[in-house]
Image (spheres, grey):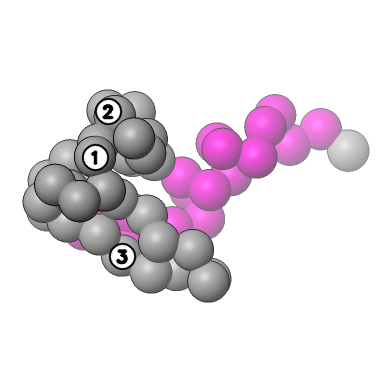
Amino acid sequence: MEKDIVCGMMVKPEEAPAKLDYQDKTYYFCDEDCKVAFDKEPEKYLKKKRGCGCS
């Protein structure tokens, strides 16, 4: 299972309705809307994944 980085839903890669390769990693999405949101602003979602952003 992979986590949809946009909405947090768990998705089976082989059954994912949408996927996208970005910076040498494949991201899986629960639907096309989440894929479009990520594709539009990937750093917004990657920033959340990386932590608080403290220096």
Residue 32 visible: yes
Q: Which residue is under mark 1?
A: 12
Q: Secondary structure at mark 2?
A: loop
Which amino acid does the dot numbered 1 rest on? Lys
- Asked if residue 21 is positioned above or below residue 45 in the image, the reply reads below
Please state the extent of the stretch shown in magenta in the rendering: 35-54
Residue 6 is situated, as x and y percent measured from the top left of the image, at 33, 39
Earlier in the chain: of badge 1 and badge 3, it is 1
Q: Residue furthest front?
A: 14
Mark 2 crowdedness (10 Å alpha carbons): few <14, some 14-19, many ≥20:
few
Position of residue 36 in the picture relative to residue 21 (left or right): left
**Amino acid type, mark 2:** Met
Looking at the rendered image, the quarter that the C terminus falls into is top right
> Is residue 52 shown above or below 38?
above
With 25 as the anchor, is 52 left or right in this view?
Answer: right
Instruction: Please give the residue where the numbered disc 3 appears in the rendered image.
Output: 20
Say what secondary structure mark 1 lies in. loop
What residue is shown at x 53% (from left), y 71% (from top)?
Answer: 23
Residue 45 falls within the magenta-colored stretch: yes
How far apart, in angstroms, are the residues tagged by discs 3 and 2?
Answer: 16 Å
Q: Quadrant of residue 53?
A: top right
